[in-house]
Amino acid sequence: MTIADREADFYDLFACPRRQGSDFLIRATQNRCLVDCEQRLWETLEATYSIVAWRLLWLTYLARCSPDTSCEEVLETHEWQILYATIHHQLYPHAAPPTLAEVVNWIARLGGFLGRSHDGSPGVKVLWRGLSRLHDIVQGWLVCQSLVIN
């Protein structure tokens, strides 16, 4: 089946009248090994999410067990500096890097953590969101830096 045939099949499927509540059936040929590809995709996703989950859990417990540790054990120098500038809208004023507890709180704020007095410590979910946003912000900063240098 070529691409044009599949597009025509989809057009016919959507154009033909059908009963309300009937489901769509999209056919796939056996020689494409969709089951095998899907299995490999799930294995890759599971491995990736396991690494991300381990890093988030490690970051959460490290911040709770040793909050006075330097943040440079977890983040690169440019990452925590960008994080500080994003949260506070200014450059970091001190010579020593911030503590891990401060950085985890900033990451959680990026993820939607409000940090009120009765909220407790940030959880894994807001840290995941915050790290995802931090990664995007750092990538944007690195692209801008490469454009300025070149």
Image (cartoon, helix red, strand yellow):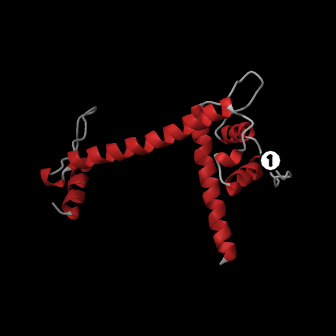
- From the top left corner, tell me how far across and down residue 122 is, in percent: 66, 31
**70 or 130: nearer the eye?**
70
Q: Secondary structure at mark 1?
A: helix
Q: Position of residue 101 (x, y in %)?
A: 72, 36
Q: Say if 115 sits above or below 86 in the image.
A: above
Point out residue 138 in the picture as x, y percentages from the top left corner.
64, 56
Give the residue furthest to the left.
30
* Count of marks placed on residues: 1
Instruction: Identify which amino acid the numbered label 1 is placed on.
Output: His
Q: Disc 1 marks which residue?
A: 88
The residue sitting at 18% across, 63% down in the picture is 2
Q: Which residue occupies the extreme bottom position in the image?
A: 150
Q: Position of residue 100 (x, y in %)?
A: 71, 40
**Crowding near the residue tagged with mark 1, few <14, some 14–19, many ≥20 C-alpha atoms within 10 Å:** few
Q: Quadrant of the N terminus?
A: bottom left
Please give left or right for residue 16 compared with residue 89 in the image: left
Residue beneath the point at 24% across and 58% down: 7
**In the rendered image, is residue 16 in sight?**
no
Which of 3 and 54 lies nearest the eye of the viewer?
54
32 shown above or below 107: below
- Is residue 1 at all visible to an observer of this figure? yes
Residue located 60% across and 45% down the image = 131
User: Which residue occupies the foreground of this view, 130 or 75?
Assistant: 75
Which residue lies at the image location 82% right of the left edge and 53% below the top edge?
Answer: 90
